[in-house]
Amino acid sequence: MNSPAAAVSPVAADGCGVGADADERPILRERGQREVFCGLTGIIWLHRKIQDAFFLVVGSRTCAHLIQSAAGVMIFAEPRFATAIIDERDLAGLADANDELDRVVERLLSRRPDIRMLFLVGSCPSEVIKLDLSRAAQRLSHKHAPAVRVLNYSGSGIETTFTQGEDACLASLVPCLPAMPEDGKASLLVVGALADVVEDQLRRLFDDLGVGPVDFFPPRMAKTLPAVGPTTRFLLAQPFLADTARALEERGARHLPAPFPLGAEGTTAWLEAAANAWGVEPERFRRVTAAGRERADRAVARYREVLAGRRVFFFPDSQLEIPIARFLARELAMTPLEVGTPYLHRQHLAAELALLPETAKLSEGQDVERQLDRCLAARPDITVCGLGLANPLEAEGLTTKWSIELLFTPVHGYEQAGDLAELFARPLQRRQALAV
Ligand code: SF4
């Protein structure tokens, strides 16, 4: 699955520094070479979520290789993504490249009348950057409306980390959401792609709490886009949706600050934020959440023996690092050494930071060589990192966990808390078994 040439985004070093967050916790800020997958990776989980959407990457052969090798196992009768390859030849005439793109889209839509939403996904090769994909999307949308809506976003590896692909995709979708009437009833929007099974579980909990109506964004079908407006309150299900949140706020929606629904504690606090906004009685909240919380506690406890006291080091990759470190520290008694995150959104992460042990060292951005030195010196029991770093670290005798698995595996909510703990226990158990 690894495609290092495609996935690594080197950025010229321009120094680093130590700053302090609002809570005075020191943060090591680094702006050196970083090692992450690009935003195209998000297509792998987004194409499973929005069932009548199609993702057309406008990119190079490298992009096609990345997306094919990362998501090569098609589980659908018809694919939901493809790459339109723009090569050197196309540099000669942008008009030709636009005509070619129109022809590709025409062919695709005539073959696949089930597609209701088409995302043109930009990438970083210079040939693609010269194409104005937003104009192309407008032109094609005009042509294929009302049957198909054509949108565009960038999955480029130049300045993104891989989860920003989802953020860019959802942010591009926000202007298409219908307007909620200003005197409409308060409604809850859960923002961030979640597995259908997780959505169903959370919806049942909200129903039992009397919170709602509830919509999930992105929806399962492009034709059921949720309405948004000043009476919308939204909960973020993922910590990497800064642009989407901003776009929703511009439409009048209001964010409900909360930790993220990872683990028993995070899920309870996240549900509580909505329950408080809806004025749910504390007793009802306890009654509705007790069974799920207890199941989650029991499932997590099974892995405490393997994980308690183990030291964990996070390289910045998925932007899930801080909530996961909080879960591992508070529910499994692990010790986070360094918690690296590509970007630190202080507002969205405020509730998480308040729960993170003081001893955890925070870093934002990356200077990969320096961070590797710190990691090797610390010799953590488990290192959470991107695919490109996992093999070299394993060769140094360290146990690793691919952070991208946190996006491929349903990990949110009470019922998945045990699976989340198991993701970290398994590599340690495997290494132990190999050592015997
Ligand atoms: S968008 Fe850039 S980083 Fe991503 S696969 Fe294409 S060339 Fe590589």
Image (cartoon, grey):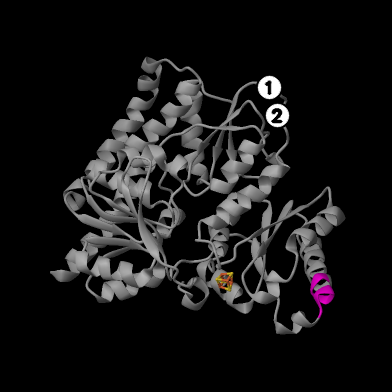
- Who is closer to the viewer here, 399 or 429? 399
Residue at the disc numbered 1: 184
Please give the range of residues in magenta.
93-98
Q: Quadrant of residue 110?
A: bottom right
Q: Residue furthest right?
A: 143
Element carrying mark 1: loop
Which residue is found at the position 48% from the left and 45% from the top?
A: 238
> In the image, residue 42 lies at what x, y percent?
55, 58
> In the image, residue 101 lies at what x, y percent?
78, 69
Residue at the disc numbered 2: 180
Name the quadrant where ligand 1 sits. Answer: bottom right
- Who is closer to the viewer here, 90 or 215? 90
Q: Residues within 10 Å of mark 2 (few under 14, many from 20)?
A: many
Indicate whether residue 134 is drawn in magenta: no
> In the image, residue 16 lies at what x, y percent?
38, 63
- In this picture, residue 91 sits left or right of residue 375: right
Q: Can the viewer see residue 48?
A: no
- Who is closer to the viewer here, 32 or 390? 32
